Amino acid sequence: MTRSAARKRRRDVLFTLGAAALLTFPLAVIMGGPVWGLQVLCDLLLAAYVLLLIQSQQRAAEKDVKVRYLAGPEHPAPEPALALRRSGS
């Protein structure tokens, strides 16, 4: 999965959880009872997802600071025509 596709998926999940939390609140106020449980569940899921996103961004930032990639080879690889031939006896 590409970075842009993952970013879009995360944004879609965040908006869906936010919409669920916003829609269940008026329902819970109007209907009461067990709908409050659904509201609390939506709020907990949204909060947990936001915390996971924050941790993921912190890990990515830490990796960018700490990880250093090695430089490529300084000498170019020998050309195939210049390579020595092996001969069997």
Image (tube, rainbow, N blue to C red):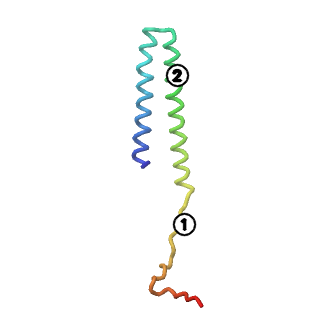
| Residue at the image point whose x is 50% and y is 76% from the top | 74
Q: Locate residue 10 relative to residue 70 in the image: left or right.
A: left
Is 38 rendered above or below residue 54?
A: above
Q: Nearer the viewer, residue 3 or 59?
A: 3
Residue 43: numbered disc: none
| Residue at the image point whose x is 52% and y is 69% from the top | 71
Q: Amino acid at mark 1?
A: Leu
Is 80 rendered above or below residue 31?
A: below
The answer to whether marks 1 and 2 mark residues whose Cβ atoms lie closer than 8 Å is: no
Q: Quadrant of the C terminus?
A: bottom right
Residue 70: numbered disc: 1
Is 72 rendered above or below residue 86?
A: above
**Percent position (x, y) of residue 73?**
51, 74
**Percent position (x, y) of residue 5?**
40, 45
Q: Secondary structure at mark 1?
A: loop
Residue 41: numbered disc: 2
Q: Secondary structure at mark 2?
A: helix
Front tag of 1 and 2: 2
**Percent position (x, y) of residue 11?**
41, 37
- The first of marks 1 and 2 along the sequence is 2
The CA distance from mark 1 to mark 2 is: 47 Å
Q: Nearer the viewer, residue 75 or 55?
A: 75
| Residue at the image point whose x is 52% and y is 54% from the top | 64
| Residue at the image point whose x is 41% and y is 19% from the top | 23
**Percent position (x, y) of residue 14?**
44, 33
The count of marks equals 2
In the image, farthest residue toward the front: 89
Q: Amino acid at mark 2?
A: Leu
